[in-house]
Image: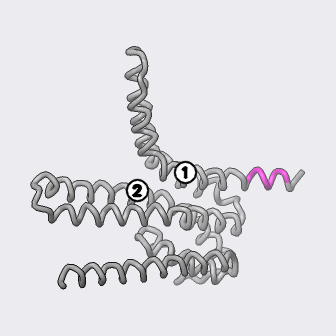
Amino acid sequence: MEEKEKSKKVSWVYALSIVYVIVAYTFFFMSGYINQLDLPDNLVSTKNAFAWFVLFLPIILCVANYIMMFTTGKKVDRKSLLNCAILVKYGLIPFYILGAILILMFLLFSFTPVPFMIFVGPYMIFVLSVIGWVILIGSAPFAIAYIMKSYKEGIHGKALSTITGILQFFFVFDVISIMILTVKEKRWKKLTFTILALLLTLLFACIIGFITLILVTIF
C-alpha cells in the first residue's frame, strides 16, 4: 500500500515533465491548426480563445511548474527529481538546436538586399529568442528542485548547488550544469556521455561546414 501511494506521489512529476516537453514542441503548430479549423460562426470566438490559450500554454505551464515543484515537489525523492530534470533538459536539446538554426537563418536574411527581410529578420530573431527563454524558464523548476533536494541531503555542496542553480536560467549552461551534476551523482552516465559526444560531433561538423563555406566563398 505504501509503495502504491509513493508511486502516485512520484508519477505526477513525470507526467508534468513529459507534458511540458511535448507542449514545447507542439504548442505553436497546435495553435495554428486550431485557427485553421472551419467551424460554425457561433463557435468562432470559442475557437479563437482556445487557440490563444494553446499559444500561451508554455507560459501557463511555466507558472504551474514552479508552483508544483516548490510545493508538492518537495515530497518527491531526489532521484525522481533528477530523472525529470534530465528528461526535460535533454528532451529539449533538439528544440534549441532547431531554434538556433532558425535564428541563424533569419540573421543571414537580415543582411540580404531585400528591404522586407531586413525588418523581418530582427523581428523573428527577437520572437524566437523570447519563446526559447520562456521555455528555458519553465524547464528550470525541475532542475532547481533536484538541486535543492540534493543540497539538503548532502550530495552536492553549497557552492556547486548555487552556481548550477543560477545556470538553469542561461542557454547551454543549464544543460552543461545538469550533465555535471548527473555524472557526479553517478546516474545516467552513459546517456549523458552519448549526448555530449553527439553534440560535440554536431558542433565539429558545423565548424567544418562554416570554414568550408567561407573558403568556397573566398576562392
Q: To which residue does mark 1 refer?
A: 22
Q: Amino acid at mark 2?
A: Val
In magenta, the rendered stretch is: 4-9
Label 1, label 2: how many angstroms apart (C-alpha)? 15 Å
| Residue under the point 24% across and 81% down | 216
Quarter of image, res 53: top left
Residue nearer the viewer, 205 or 60: 205
In which quadrant of the rendered image does the C terminus lie? Answer: bottom left
Q: Residue at x 41, y 23 (%)?
A: 38
| Residue 162 seen in the figure | no
Give coordinates of residue 211: x percent, y percent. Answer: 30, 84
Vertical relation: 70 (above or below) 30: below
**Residue displayed at 36% across by 82% down:** 207
Q: Return the residue nearer the eye: 96 or 154.
A: 96
Disc 1 packing (10 Å; few <14; some 14–19; many ≥20): few
Label 2 packing within 10 angstroms: few (<14), some (14-19), many (20+): some
Magenta span dominant secondary structure: helix
The tag on residue 134 is 2
Identify the element where label 1 is drawn.
helix
Residue 118 image point, x, y percent: 14, 58
Give the number of callouts: 2
Residue 74's place in the image compared with 42, above or below, is below
